[in-house]
Amino acid sequence: MSVTVRVPAKVNVQLAVGAARPDGFHDLANVFLAVGLYDEVTVTPAEELRVTCAGPDAAEVPLDRTNLAARAAIALAERRGLDPAVHLHIAKDIPVAGGMAGGSADGAGALLACDALWGTGASREELLEICAELGSDVPFSLVGGAALGTGRGEKLRTLEVGGEFSWVFAMAERGLSTPAVFREFDRLTEGLDVPEPVASEDLLDALAGGDPDALAAAVSNDLQPAALSLFPELADTLAAGSAAGALAGLVSGSGPTTAFLARDTGAAAKIADALRASGTCRTVRVASGPAPGATVI
Ligand code: C5P
């Protein structure tokens, strides 16, 4: 008997970042949009906890207990006094260390899969609480769709989306560490008055209206200067996407994946071809959002 859960990637259409808090985290106004690139997590009873991974980036995925999927299984088992003796297999399609919440997706997926396998019957509330303990972006991976995350990003308010948005994602030659990007943000804003992060009303209206031009005019990412400072070549990818006719281009979350909004799927295919030909990135993927959250399949 095994259970498989499919979990989407995300792009941040707005990432407003406040000053570092005493605990080192940053308050955010984080507008998440789930997009149709998915990891699948399959959980099967086993002698002891182990993690395997398959997919183009599998070699970069840690298979020990630092993997968020393993941590999710352990967290749920501890709450129920169970032994987390399961084999977690991750079929990985979301880029690793890319700013698209791939690790978070695996955490949310493993949690939902173990809940179903063990019949723990955890409430949505408890699942979200465990997700928040695992990481700032994990609750959104469970929920999917579109949401505004506040606090360190874990307090979610579901957002209405009035249409499908077409995206092109350019994966970079190497990853970026999220803590390193936040540290660079702190360095770049040292001595400056960093305003409280607030969600843009224009952006929320654009999402609700399903209007790609309005969304393009409103997207923003306060971590982008920090990501570009650590990875200057990303500017070439952003320029290539813009020259190819993207309505907007930005770094996704802490990067280094860059995200390009297209008017429709036809335009997205053309932008993807141009980015592939540009030689400024490793791989290019097309996906649209909103996509559903973690789902047992
Ligand atoms: O919550 P998570 O473990 O995903 O965060 C990874 C790292 O990103 C944190 O250790 C912290 O350095 C940084 N972070 C932050 N503020 C947030 C979310 C993450 O500084 N709101």
Image (cartoon, rainbow, N blue to C red):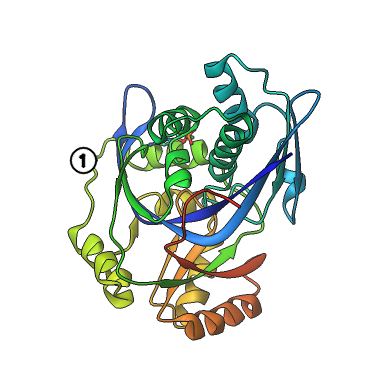
Where's residue 288, x and y in %? 48, 69
Q: Which residue is drawn at 65% across and 30% down?
A: 70
- Is residue 215 shown left or right of residue 76? left
The residue singled out by tag 1 in the image is: 196
The reply to whether residue 232 is visible in this rendering is yes
Ligand 1 shows up in the quarter that is: top left
Which of the pair 36/240 is nearer the observer?
A: 36
- Furthest residue to the right? 47
- Furthest residue to the top? 81
Amino acid type of disc 1? Glu
Q: In this view, does 74 lie above or below 249?
A: above
Where's residue 76, x and y in %? 55, 24
Which of the pair 295/169 is nearer the observer?
A: 295
Q: What element carries label 1?
A: loop
Where's residue 201, x and y in %? 18, 59
Q: Quadrant of residue 197?
A: top left
- Is residue 290 shown left or right of residue 78? left
Q: Which residue is drawn at 71% across and 40% down?
A: 2
Which of the pair 29/68 is nearer the observer?
A: 68
The reply to whether residue 244 is visible in this rendering is no
| The N terminus - image quarter | top right
